[in-house]
Image (cartoon, rainbow, N blue to C red):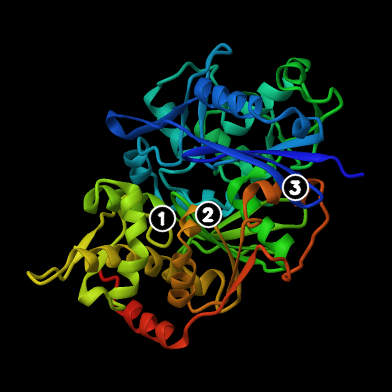
Amino acid sequence: MEQGFLGIDVGSTAIKVGIIVKGTSIYHSSQALTTYDEAGGARYQKATEILQTIAGLLSEIPREFMEQVGSLSFSVAMHSLMPVVNGQFDKIFLWSDQQATEVIRQLPVATARRFYLRSGTPIHPMSTFAKLLYFQQAQTYPENTSWWGLKELLMDYFTGQVAIDVATASATGMCNVESGQWDEEILAYLGVEKGQLAPIIPVNQVFEIREERVKQFGLKPQTSVYCGASDGCLAAYAGLATTGIANSLTIGTSAALRSIGPDHKLDVIQQPFAYRLTDKLFVSGGPSNNGGSVLAWASGIFSGDSSTFFRELPEILETTPIGAGGVKFYPFLNGERAPYWDAELTGGFQNLRITTTRQEMIRSVVEGILLNLRTLKPSIIGSGALTLSGGFFDTPEFAQLTVDVLGNEAVLSKENEPIFGLYYLLVGAKNPDLTLTNVEKLVPNRKKSELYEMLHQGYFKF
C-alpha cells in the first residue's frame, strides 16, 4: 500500500504544503511570506519566519492525514543565499536581490562567458554567484562564513544535516554543469572553499528525520526525508510526468519557459540556463523577471484593490481589441533576464494618447508580459506543445490568451506544480493520462495567433 507523500514548497512569495496519496492530493495549504527591502537593492526574507511558517502549516494538518505520511521532500526557489556566521543565520537573500548589479557590470565579459559555459547559469545579479561575489568584495561577512540557501536551511531543520541537491546547486552559478559538483575554478575566483558550502547530493538521496520533528508534527519515526529539487525543475518534471510533454511555461511572481530532456545546449549570446536534475535529465530554458509581480503592480496602479482588479480582468480582455488600441507596455519593471540580461532595463507604456482608456492600458500590461515570453519561444520550445503552471493561471482566461499569444497548444493541470513534481520524481510512477478530469487542453485560436504574431514582430524596439 502506497504511503502518503508530504511536499513542502518554499517559493518566492509563499510556502505551500501538500499531501499526495496514490497520485491524488488529499490536503493542501499555503501561507504568504514577508519580503524585506533595504537600501542598495537588498531584498531578503528571514530564516526564522520561514521555519515558523512551515511549522505553523504542518501543525494545522489533521492527524488522520499526517499519520499517512511515509516520506517528505522539499521544493525551493532558486538563487537564494544565506550567510551563516558561527552557526547563526538570519537573512536569506532572494533571486530578486540587486546588490550585485554594479559588481556584475564590472565583471569582464570573457570571465562571465567562461563561467556561464562551466556552470550553465547566466551571470546576472540574480545568481547566487553574483551575491557571493558582492559580499566577498565588500567584505561584508567574516572569512569563515558558511554559505547556505533555502535548501540547506530546510535540510538542517528536518534532518540535522546540511546538504543541497544537484538541481538547486545547478542554479547557483557555482556548480559545474557537467560534473554536478562545485566548480573549483569558480570557487577559487570567489575566494571560497568547498568546506564553506554544503555537499551536493542527488535529488533522491534519503535521510532520517530528526526525532524533534517527529514529535513536533506527529510524523512517523521512520519517515524518509528526500533532499528534493528546485521549483523550476520540478514544475518542468511534473509536466513531463503527468502529460508526457517536455516543454513547460511557469508564470508566478516571475516566469520561465523550459524544456526537459537528456541533453542541454549553451549559447553565450542568448544564454539559456541549463540545470542538472538527475544523471539523465537537464532542464534548459529562459527566465523572465516579469510575471505576476507586474500584474500585482498594475492592480495597485489601476485599482488599488487586487481582488477588484482581477475580477475585472476577464471583461476587460473580452471588450478590448488585440493590440490594446496601439498601446504597448514594456514589462521590465524588475529589469530583465532572458534574452536581454540587463538588470537596469526599465518598463513603461508607449503610444499613449488623450483617447487611451484605462482598459486599453490594462490589456497592454497583460499583452506585454506574454509577448515578452514569446520572444523566448523560438530558442527554447519552438512550436511544440507545452504545459502551463503557476498562479498567473488562476485567472482562467489567461490560459487561453497565453496559447493564443504563443501559438502553441498547451495543457493546464493542477498537477503541473512543484509538489507534484516532487511526488513523481521521488515516489510516484509516471502517469501520462490526459483523460483526467482535472486536465484542460488548450488550442490556440489561429486568427488571434496570427494577429499576435504580427504584433510581436514590431513590439520590442530599443
Which residue is under mark 1? Answer: 291
Q: For mark 2, does the 10 Å Cα neighbourhood hold few (<14), some (14 to 19), or many (20 or more) residues?
A: many
The numbered dot on residue 440 is none
Residue at image point 78% right, 16% down: 211
Name the residue furthest left: 354
Quadrant containing the C terminus is: bottom left
**Mark 2 to mark 1 CA distance (whole Å):** 10 Å
Q: In the rendered image of this protein, does residue 32 appear above or below residue 308?
A: above
Label number found at residue 390: 2
SS of the residue at dot 2?
loop
Callout 2–callout 3 Cβ contact below 8 Å: no
At 66% from the left and 56% from the top, the residue drawn is 415
From this viewpoint, is residue 453 visible?
Answer: yes
Q: Is residue 155 left or right of residue 132?
A: right
Q: Quadrant of the N terminus?
A: top right
Sequence-wise, the earlier of marks 3 and 1 is 1
Amino acid type for the residue under numbered disc 3: Tyr
Residue annotated with mark 3 = 423
Relative to the observer, which residue lies in front, 225 or 441?
441
- What is the three-letter code of the residue carrying label 2? Gly
